[in-house]
Structures are given as structure tokens and as C-alpha cells.
Amino acid sequence: MPITIDPEKIMTMQLKPTFPWFSFLMVVALACGSRAPACQENPGKPTISVSGAQAGDTNYYAVELPKTGTVSVTISASGDTPCPTGGEKCKCNDQTKDPEADGSPVYTFSKTVGNQDPADGPTVKWDVTSSTGPGEYKFKVTKIDQKYKACAQGWTGGVSLKSNTQASDEVTVLVYKYETETISTTPSDQTRVNLGIGEEVKITITPSSVNASWSLTTGDGGFSSSSGSVTQFNASKSPGSATVRAAFYGINKDTTFSVVAPSGMNSALKSDGSLGTAGPPNNNIGAKSVFDCTVQPTTVSFYNAEFQEKIPGDTWTWPDGTGGSRPAATVPWTTSFDNKTTDTVSSALASINRIKQSGTFVNFSVSIRVPEEYKDKNSNWVAWLPGETHPREYRGSDQKTRVLINASNSAAGAWMGPWQ
């Protein structure tokens, strides 16, 4: 017998009495379409995450401002929109389904920087460069929209748009500038991390609102302030390495400094002095010269180190048989930023007869020991140039004298005298 299906229920067809009923149901199902896409009946608020930045406290991230190049940061979100309900669903006969989605969900971000390209999905991409302003940048998702297509022909109901208007948590990305600057302007590279014993380094984090906690994770040294955006690191008076840590908002920024002791000293004649009025009459011998001395290495500065000449004292016998001596003494000294100091070397006056032997003036020399020491972190004095000497040379042919410095190199003053 003929079977008629109401046109409002999609279609009319003739089936022979022998047509199986399961086939009839399949035809109706095909006419009504396939199952609708899944959705969340009670979606929660969207979630948001950050890549390309250092994670700190909850929802807090940081990027150090690059001196060159680019740091790429991506803010990603995920979430669901509510399912169509009631009359928003598509209906066919006794079937219901969600309408077909019209494209992917569209995420609305509240952001201070970055680009949101729909082709990239639910993301904001942001390139941090050296010209990016230090400060806090905030991001969150305020809404997710899902568009829907109209129900298929023969279906009723439908909805054009469903939205999740719950906002995600807000995330903060801090862009900070981290600078180290040696107090010494020599060497010219004030960003260096190789330091002389006792050197001082100013460390600054921008923006100034960052309240960092300053500490050492390895090594020795001290700080002018243990908290804040600015501190001064005072390197140890002993060689080694030290790692400075700035901790802020769950972020750790570490910088390792290498601290070195002096390794030598180069000298050069600066000027010659005088020990009186030149003869005749020729009564006395002696010399005085001033030397420029530079502590090595010059790749760091020793302006804040404490030095001393630890002169042990020396004795000798002049050619005429008279005894001579240089008493023990301790002579403190320091350098300027460029590791330079001056050293005045003098033999003092002696009778010209001291270099007579059997009635004839003869050559003679004596070497005065002047070992160098520096004060370490425990206030102990440490030898670093134990072999330094200040020779005095006397020439019999014209009774002239000169003084020298033998350190990492040799430097000599002019021959001078004799004196009245």
C-alpha cells in the first residue's frame, strides 16, 4: 500500500509493502542530516597561557629587554561556548541537534600590545625588541563568540551566535631592562663582568617599580642595598667568582662576575728628581726618580684595592768597607681607575767616598727588596709581586748614580750627580 510522509517532515516517497522499516528510518535520517558538533552546556571561563617569557608568580611572566634581536612572546587562550538550547537547536521530525558551526570560535582579547591574526587562532603574538618600553603589559580574554550556520532545509529552529562572556584570568608580562655598570670608567666597557678585587658595580632594573631582592647564590661580596630596583655590588677583596641574584615576582635574574687579583706591574720613567746641588765640589752621591706604575691586568680596575710595599729591610757593605742599610718599612698605596700610581724611588745621599776602593772610584750596586701585597677579604695581606726590587747603581768613572724598578719589567732613571 502507498506510504505518504508529510512534506513538513522533509520528504514524500512511495514504498512497496515489502520495503523494510529499518530502511525507511535510514532514509529519514539521511534526509535530516548528520549529528551536530559537540559543545559545553555550562562552559567555564577561558584559560590563558604565555610562551616565550619566563614564568614567575601565578599569571606573571617576564621578558628581559634584548640589547639586539627579538624575543617573540605568544599569548594563547582556550575555552568553550555554550551549547544552543531549546529552540536554538535544529529540529527534524523527532530529532534535534546543534546547528553547524560557521567557522572557528572568535576570541576577543583585552591587551595593551601585540597582534591578533585570525589565521593564528586564539593567540596574540608580540615581538619584544630593544625599543620596547619597559613596564607591565596585561592580557586577558573577555569573550568567545561562535557563529552558527542556518539549519539545513527542512529543519526548523537554529541560532546565529553563541557567546561565552566570562573573562579569563588576567596575565601580566613584565618587560624589564637589566643593566650592570662598573663604577670605574676604565676600562671603557662598563658592562663587563670581569672585575678586579674590590671593584664596585651599579646594577639597575627598569622600571623602577620593580622591588627586587638582592643576594649572592655563590661567592663573596656585598650590596649597598638588599632590596629595590637599584643596588651596588661590591666585589670581594679576594679572587673568585660571585653570582648575583635579583629576585622579583617569582623571577630570578642571575649574573656571574669573575673577580681577579693583581698579577703584575709595569713601570716606566715619569721624571727625574734631584738630591741637591750638582758639584763641584763633588761630595755626595745618590739619585731620585719618579716612575709611572700600572697594575696588571688592565682589563679590570683595582682602584678599590688596598696595596702595600712590605719592605723587609736590607744591609750591605760599601766598597770602602762601610756598612749600609735600608730599614724595613711598610708603604701603603692605591691606584686610580686606570690602575696607575706613581712611585718615587730614591737612594738618599751618601758620601762619595763610599764607592772608593783602594783610593779608586769603582762601580757598585745594591738591590733593595720591595715585595708587593694586597689586603684580602679577611684583612690578611697576600703577596702578589714578591720579587720586585729597586736597584741602586753607582758608576765609578764619573761618580753618577741611578735608581731602577724591577717589577714585571725594568725601568731606569737617568744617571745623575755627584752632588755638593
Image: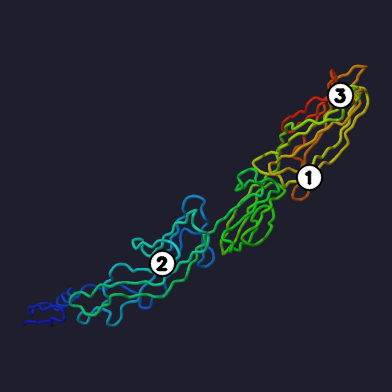
Q: Amino acid at mark 2?
A: Ala
Observer-nearest of 162 and 91: 162
Residue 271, horizontal then vertical, whole percent: 76, 31
Front position among marks 1 and 3: 3
Q: What's the residue at 18%, 75% (across, down)?
A: 153
**Left of 274 or right of it: where is 186?**
left
Q: Quadrant of residue 301?
A: top right
The numbered dot on residue 418 is 3
Of the 4 image quadrants, the one containing the C terminus is: top right
**Whole-number angstrom distance, CA of label 2 to CA of label 1:** 62 Å
- Residue 400 position (above or below residue 55): above
**Whole-number angstrom distance, CA of label 1 to CA of label 3:** 39 Å
Contact, CB < 8 Å: mark 2 with mark 1?
no
Identify residue for label 1. 381
- Neighbourhood count class around disc 3 (C-alpha, 10 Å): few under 14, some 14–19, many 20 upward: many
Residue 399, horizontal then vertical, whole percent: 86, 21
Q: Earlier in the sequence, mark 3 or mark 2?
A: 2
**Left of 350 or right of it: where is 196?**
left
Q: In the structure shown, which secondary structural element does the residue marked by tag 1 occupy? A: strand
Q: Earlier in the sequence, mark 2 or mark 1?
A: 2
Contact, CB < 8 Å: mark 1 with mark 3?
no
Q: Amino acid at mark 1?
A: Trp
**Whole-number angstrom distance, CA of label 3 to CA of label 2:** 92 Å
Identify residue for label 2. 77
Q: What's the residue at 51%, 53% (across, down)?
A: 66
Q: In the structure shown, which secondary structural element does the residue marked by tag 2 occupy? A: strand
